[in-house]
Image (spheres, rainbow, N blue to C red):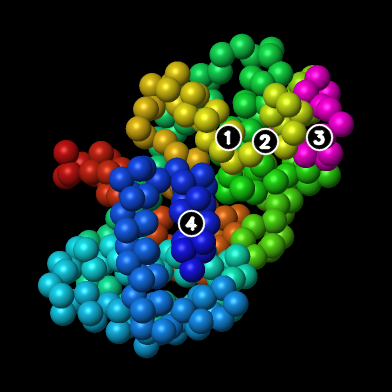
């Protein structure tokens, strides 16, 4: 069962860019859960996770309360458990999610962090050598990521046939292999076109296949490789500590909603199975509405 936790932790590191402290908290929480499940005889099935049900998890959480864990700690452990099982469901490791009805102590709500439009502009303008193949690739990736709101895994999994520059759209396969078609703006399409025409042919090798984005060895770029690229670009833009691979996805959603896009439209673009997942962004846009109101209303000055 720890192998499933380790795969989840790897996903959180590369896809979500969680901090070392957050990763350590996840590891401690989930290893503790595994120890309980195995000791209580709930870790059954081919992978150990398919035998875990809601009563087993409720019993585990009740035990935490009885042992004097604080509301904040228990809420974090509930969140860790829910995140893990969400991952296990999406990866096809378990068929149903036993955490769907688990309640958590109320300790406040954390919101996704989004860059301002100015910060995004700084990030996109912070290239090194615009003519080098790697620089053209990096610019194309960042423009495409912000234009589409794709997950990093979806970005690096793209093949050449998945991008239609004439129609300015990209086809990607999200969690659970769900396909969606995302429109992209002209600037992003231009940057991808420049990369495909001027840079990718110089990077291509016999190991490239049909992958769009290649590393220096001519192989498909990995999530880890993208994370290193983003960290370097963020540092040059002066955005240290403010950005992870998932930040551009948050920024994409927030900026669309603030610009007037409907929540349902943003849900479809992000590939969220449930609109409740997308609704977290409405809190960010509510803050924007309040700010604009305070600036504009004569009696709010």
**Mark positioned earlier in the residue sequence (4 or 3):** 4
- The residues bearing labels 2 and 3 have C-alpha atoms spaced at a distance of 10 Å
Q: Name the residue under label 4.
A: 6
Badge 1 marks a residue whose secondary structure is helix
Q: In which quarter of the image is the C terminus?
A: top left
**Mark positioned earlier in the residue sequence (2 or 3):** 3
The reply to whether callout 3 and callout 1 are in contact (CB within 8 Å) is no
Closer to the camera in the image, 203 or 112? 203
- The residues bearing labels 4 and 3 have C-alpha atoms spaced at a distance of 29 Å
**Residue occupying image coordinates x 75% and y 33%:** 219
Q: Is the magenta stretch mostly helix, strand or loop?
A: loop
Badge 2 marks a residue whose secondary structure is loop
Q: Quadrant of residue 45?
A: bottom right
In the displayed structure, would residue 218 be above or below residue 112? above
Does 95 sit left or right of 72 as displayed? right
**Mark positioned earlier in the residue sequence (1 or 2):** 2
Q: Name the residue under label 3.
A: 208
Q: Mark 2 points at which residue?
A: 221
Badge 3 marks a residue whose secondary structure is loop
The reply to whether callout 1 and callout 2 are in contact (CB within 8 Å) is yes
Q: Give the extent of the magenta segment.
A: 200-213
**Residue occupying image coordinates x 36% and y 43%:** 19
Q: Position of residue 95 (x, y in %)?
A: 59, 78
Report the disc number at residue 226. 1
Label 1 crowd bin: few (<14), some (14–19), many (20+), radius 10 Å: many
Q: In front of the other: label 2 or label 4?
A: 4
């Amino acid at each position: 069962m720890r192998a499933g936790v380790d795969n989840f932790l790897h996903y959180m590191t590369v896809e979500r860019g969680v901090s070392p402290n957050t990763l350590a908290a996840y590891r401690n929480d989930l290893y503790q859960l595994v120890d309980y499940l195995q000791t209580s005889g709930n870790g059954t099935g081919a992978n150990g996770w398919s035998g875990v049900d809601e009563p087993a998890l409720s019993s585990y959480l009740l035990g935490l309360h009885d042992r004097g864990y604080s509301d904040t700690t228990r809420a974090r452990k509930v969140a860790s458990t829910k995140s893990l099982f969400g991952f296990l469901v999406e990866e096809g490791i378990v068929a149903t999610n036993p955490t769907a009805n688990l309640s958590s102590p109320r300790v406040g709500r954390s919101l996704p962090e989004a860059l301002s439009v100015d910060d995004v502009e700084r990030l996109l303008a912070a290239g090194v050598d615009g003519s080098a193949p790697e620089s053209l690739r990096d610019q194309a990736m960042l423009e495409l990521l912000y234009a589409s709101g794709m997950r990093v895994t979806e970005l690096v999994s793209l093949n050449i046939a998945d991008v239609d520059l004439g129609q300015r759209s990209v086809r990607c396969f999200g969690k659970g292999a769900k396909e969606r078609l995302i429109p992209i703006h002209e600037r992003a399409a231009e940057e991808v076109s420049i990369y495909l025409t001027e840079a990718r042919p110089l990077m291509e090798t016999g190991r490239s296949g049909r992958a769009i984005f290649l590393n220096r060895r001519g192989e498909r770029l990995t999530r880890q490789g993208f994370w290193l690229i983003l960290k370097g670009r963020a540092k040059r833009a002066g955005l240290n500590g403010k950005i992870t691979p998932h930040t551009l996805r948050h920024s994409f959603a927030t900026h669309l909603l603030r610009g007037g896009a409907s929540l349902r439209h943003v849900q479809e673009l992000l590939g969220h199975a449930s609109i409740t997942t997308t609704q977290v962004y409405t809190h960010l846009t509510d803050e924007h509405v309040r700010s604009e109101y305070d600036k504009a209303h004569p009696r709010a000055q």
